[in-house]
């Protein structure tokens, strides 16, 4: 049974030649989020890193020939789940971007690798490691 | 226009009381990937950290009352895009897990926070920071 997703907004950028991956990108653009999700953007502030999940909306449909591919700058084939290929069984992309400014439903961000018009599926807090979840606090240690 | 996703496999675990988030979880389980994606699992090995995208298949449908929520252990409401709530506009979850063993289409992993039967949407390499993409190599510096 298929799972249906709907865009929460779109990426806008006038950078024409985007780097292949956020980890090597200094490109800037905006995340234009739908007005109906405005309140959900509370707490996103300049200086934060956030995770953006998006749809590779211009990628070819996946087929078996994309199960192993040779990424750019590599000399051998690798499995699709070990590389950042936009042609995947489910065409979901993930980028970690830095918020430069948050104004209403527009987030200005740096390090993008998504094309202008890319549908955004979700935004999540960037959690580096263990015990770093915003809703986590250390359990109280019993006083003895 | 809705975007359709289909599970690439399912999470299996016999842990009944799962931690709320991977960053505080030592729970173990397996990712059982569909046979047709076997070749895509090439290069996933014990010791690696991987990103698992999955569907919050048992979460309530999203509505406006979930735009701001008070997470467990917090004393104030936060925007849905700044917290790890499973009730989101698009019910996609993200966990970073450690591979304990990779055998065929079964990955044994630690740090799971997904329930038994959770549909898996994608697996991606865990990329910590800049210039860390598996397909990236530093450009050659011109010899002078």
Image (cartoon, coloured by chain):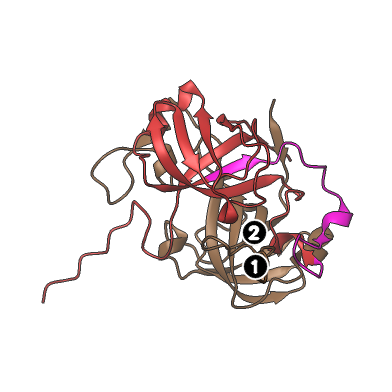
Chain colours: A red, B brown
Using the image, determine if residue B142 lies above or below residue A106. Answer: below
Residue at image location 84% in from the left, 58% down from the top: B36
Q: Badges 2 and 1: C-beta atoms under 8 Å apart?
A: no
* Picture quadrant of residue A65: bottom right
Q: In this figure, which residue is indicated by the disc labeled 2?
A: B124
> Is residue B130 something one can see in this rendering?
yes
- Callout 1: helix, strand or loop? loop
Q: In this figure, which residue is indicated by the disc labeled 1?
A: B141
* Horizontal and vertical percent position of residue A131: 36, 63
- Callout 2: helix, strand or loop? strand
Marks 2 and 1 sit apart, C-alpha to C-alpha, by 30 Å
Characterize the local packing of mark 1: few (<14), some (14-19) or many (20 or more) Cα atoms within 10 angstroms.
few
**Which quarter of the rendered picture does the N terminus of chain B lie within?**
top right
Task: Say which chain tag 2 marks.
Answer: B
Q: Name, please, the residue furthest toward the front.
A: B144
Side of A75 relative to B55 (left or right):
right
In front: A61, or B11? A61
* Horizontal and vertical percent position of residue B111: 50, 67
* Horizontal and vertical percent position of residue B9: 71, 56
Residue at image location 58% in from the left, 37% down from the top: A121
Q: Nearer the viewer, mark 2 or mark 1?
A: 1
In front: A53, or B110? A53
As for residue A47 lying within the magenta part, the answer is no
Task: Say which chain tag 1 marks.
Answer: B
In front: A52, or A137? A52
Using the image, determine if residue B101 lies above or below residue B77. Answer: below
Helix, strand or loop: magenta stretch:
loop
Where residue B41 is drawn, which disc sits there?
Answer: none
- Which residue range is magenta in the image? A52-77
Residue at image location 77% in from the left, 70% down from the top: B42
> Is residue B17 something one can see in this rendering?
no
């Amino acid at each position: 049974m298929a799972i249906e997703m709907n865009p929460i907004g779109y990426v806008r950028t006038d950078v024409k030649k985007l780097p292949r991956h956020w980890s090597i990108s200094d490109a800037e653009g905006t995340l234009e989020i739908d007005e109906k999700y405005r309140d959900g953007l509370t707490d996103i502030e300049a200086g934060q890193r956030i995770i953006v999940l998006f749809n590779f909306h211009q990628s070819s449909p996946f087929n078996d020939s994309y199960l192993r591919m040779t990424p750019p700058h590599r000399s051998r084939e690798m499995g699709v789940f070990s590389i950042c290929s936009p042609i995947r069984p489910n065409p979901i992309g993930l980028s970690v971007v830095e918020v430069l400014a948050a104004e209403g439903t527009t987030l200005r961000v740096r390090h993008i690798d998504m094309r202008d018009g890319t549908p955004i599926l979700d935004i999540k807090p960037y959690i580096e490691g263990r015990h770093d979840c915003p809703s986590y606090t250390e359990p109280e240690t019993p006083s003895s």
